[in-house]
Amino acid sequence: TQNPQAWHTMDWPLIVDWPQRPRQKVDHSHGKPSQTRWRAVRTHPLGHLLDVQPLTGRTHQIRVHLATAGLPILGDTLYAPADVAARSPRLLLHAQGLRFVHPLLGTECHFACDPEFP
């Protein structure tokens, strides 16, 4: 049996959807490499709570990858179907943690903030 909380990787190249800017889209011919890791944390009455880690940094990467995988984000008015977008008054995407090297000091910076939604 598979572990339902195992990590999965989405590996779909992304490109701007010029006629529908600012939307992005998956394009296997011309898109830039884009990878996102994800796993299910728990089921919630509104859907699923996921841990998501972008391995690349493309515009709207998490939103496009999840919508393409059939896991649109609640409140996402750009990529989710209208009924899913309407299930939240705001986009339920939250950066729980950020880590990067400071561009001037060269030191590693860490920031953490728990989400406000359950």
Image: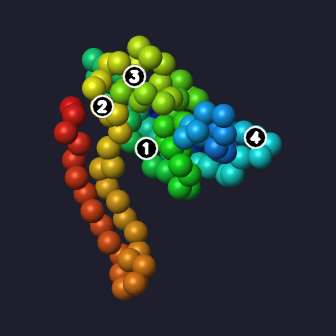
Pointer 3 residue: 85
- Residue 77 visible somewhere in the drawing: yes
Amino acid type, mark 4: His
Pointer 1 residue: 52
Residue drawn at point x = 40 percent, y = 19 percent = 84
**Residue 110 sits in quarter:** bottom left
Closer to us: 47 or 92: 92
Mark 4 or mark 3: whose residue is earlier in sequence = 4
Residue drawn at point x = 56 percent, y = 52 percent = 58
Residue 20 is left or right of residue 63, and the answer is right
**Residue 26 sits in quarter:** top right
- Figure check: 97 above or below 102: above
In this rendering, the label closer to the viewer, 3 or 1: 3
At numbered mark 4, what does the secondary structure look like: helix, strand or loop? loop
In this rendering, the label closer to the viewer, 1 or 4: 4
Pointer 2 residue: 90
Residue drawn at point x = 53 percent, y = 55 percent = 57
> Is the C-beta separation of discs 1 and 4 under 8 Å?
no
In this rendering, the label closer to the viewer, 2 or 1: 2
Mark 3 or mark 1: whose residue is earlier in sequence = 1
Amino acid type, mark 2: Arg
